[in-house]
Image (cartoon, rainbow, N blue to C red):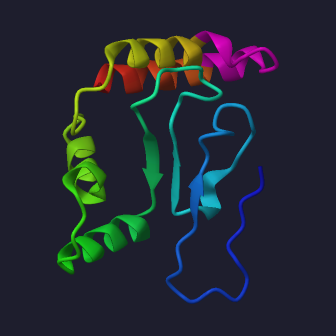
Amino acid sequence: MPIERVAGADEGALVLVDATSGAGGLPVDIAQSDVYYFAPQKSFAADGGLWIAVFSPAALERAARVHASGRHVPEFFSLPTAIDNSLKNQTYNTPALATLFLLNDQLRIAMFPAVEPSDVEALTACVDYVIEQL
């Protein structure tokens, strides 16, 4: 899935990708995105109620700036709250534990039918690290 910055966009424009329908099912290089996020209930066949996001420094700064503006955002939807909890290896609400276990299994086993064994080993090591941090 190619991601490209929009030609002629204002300086400071951010590229956000809602990858819920494609994450885990489409190859992607997220280097040109500022926020790449998804809920694992599609390709990963997990339960709903969890989302995963990768933010660029520019996106983190923008979220803080919007929050500082005083604009009302319910805590449940607050990106600074989600970011702060993420830095603490926490979530705002307790996710269904089955979702975390199923996502772990999907990452370790189900997503590899056409992947090189050495890539599986490298990815499994990364997944192990992430799971240890949860």
Give the residue at x 75% y 38%: 26
Please name whichever residue, 12 or 39, is drawn nearer the observer in this view of the structure: 39
The spot of residue 112 in percent (x, y) is 72, 17
- Residue 96, located in which quarter of the rendered image? top left
In this rendering, the count of numbered labels is 0
Residue at 21%, 39% in the rendered image: 92
Q: Is residue 7 magenta?
A: no
118 to the left or right of 129: right
How far across and how far down the image is residue 134, in percent?
29, 25
Residue 61 placement, left or right of 16: left
Left or right placement of residue 46 versus residue 89 in this view: right
Q: Quadrant of residue 130?
A: top left
Q: Where is residue 124 drawn, in percent x and y?
A: 55, 18
Q: Is residue 119 above or below residue 28?
A: above
Magenta stretch: give its range: 109-121
Residue 128, placed above or below residue 66: above
Considering depth in this image, is 51 or 11 the residue closer to the camera? Answer: 51
Residue at the spot 62% in from the left edge and 29% down from the top edge: 42
Q: Which is nearer the eye, 121 or 81?
A: 81
Residue 31 in the image: state x and y as whole percent.
Answer: 61, 58
Asked if 107 appears above or below 64 in the picture, the reply is above
